[in-house]
Image: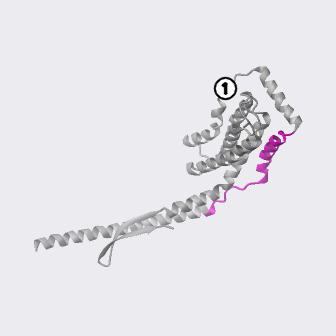
Amino acid sequence: MKCYQINRNALILILLLVNIYQVSAQDTIRNINAALQDSTIKKTNYKGYKLNYKHLIAPTVFIGFGIVSLESDGLKYLNFSTREEINEHQPKHISLDNYTQYAPAAMVYGLNAAGIKGKHNFRDRTIIYATSQLISAAFVVPLKHIVTEERPDGSNKLSFPSGHTATAFSSAQFMFREYKDTSFWLSISGYSFAVFTGVYRAINDKHWVNDVVAGAGFGILSTELAYWLYPKINGLLSDKEKKAMTMIMPFYQNKSFGIGLVQNF
């Protein structure tokens, strides 16, 4: 009788704990659903970035100049005369341009870490910046192998357009878009690093002027396209995150135990 009493008390305790867990789990599910609804609302209300034709004027002019320079005798002369002028002064070749191309993007993350918030949070701006670099590479790498323009130093025929300059200006445009509503002067500070990178690609005898100008155009265009594409990319990533959310829990109902699987689609 005593053994029965102990077993009965233990069973009551187990049932009580399961009941409490079930109520807690239901509250958890409700909180998850509410969070997902809020996320969906935010995603729906996000207007995104409108690609205005005015934003494409500068990159179109830069890219057009670079392409025309490939065939124009007058602009080719500008390339050679600029190189001769640089060589007359015999400037010291430095490799800082390998690092300054990323400086504006690094500044965005540094400023956010210091509490000066930009337009997007860490996740969103990382998606945007990564997208801009992928688009830039999609422009630059194939063109280098299609155009096969010889570098000024004769090292290879992958001169047009300048990849370093494209990265630098895409980073600078990224900083501009993130901080133009916070501080205009802060937002344009990244362009100083971009210009430095482009100038030193010419000083280091790695690129002609038209390579640098075209690279700047492709860099700016890549970032503009990345901001325009972001809402679509974010939507795809958000859908995947929702589908991946699952919960497994035990339950007690109608005098029987079981295990339940909750998955949000």
The one nearer the camera, 99 or 116, is: 99
In the image, taking residue 145 as reference, residue 265 lies left or right, namely left
Identify the residue at horizontal 57%, vertical 39% (top origin).
110
Q: Is residue 59 magenta?
A: yes
Instruction: Please give left or right for residue 32 compared with residue 46 in the image.
Output: left
Residue 111 seen in the current view: yes
Q: Quadrant of residue 16?
A: bottom left
Tell me which residue sits at (79%, 51%) in the image.
54
> x%, y% of residue 247?
42, 64
Q: Nearer the viewer, residue 211 or 125?
A: 211
Estimate the x, y position of residue 36 in percent, counting from the top left: 52, 64
Front residue (pair 142, 217): 142
Main SS of residues in magenta: helix
118 w.r.t. 245: above or below: above
Q: Nearer the viewer, residue 116 or 252?
A: 252
Say above or below: 88 vs 224. Answer: above
Q: Position of residue 135 (x, y in %)?
A: 67, 49
For residue 186, above or below residue 7: above
Q: Quadrant of residue 48?
A: bottom right
Residue 180 seen in this snapshot: no
Residue 229: within the magenta?
A: no
Q: Which quadrant is home to the N terminus?
A: bottom left
Q: How is the rendered protein coloured?
A: one colour
For the record, the magenta segment spans 44-71
Residue for badge 1: 94
The percent coordinates of residue 142 (x first, y second) are 71, 45
Q: Residue furthest bottom?
A: 254
Q: For the residue labelled by badge 1, is the local secondary structure a helix, a strand or a loop?
A: loop
Q: Residue at x 78, y 23 (%)?
A: 87
Residue that extends furthest to the left in the rendered view of this protein: 1
Q: Amino acid at mark 1?
A: Ile
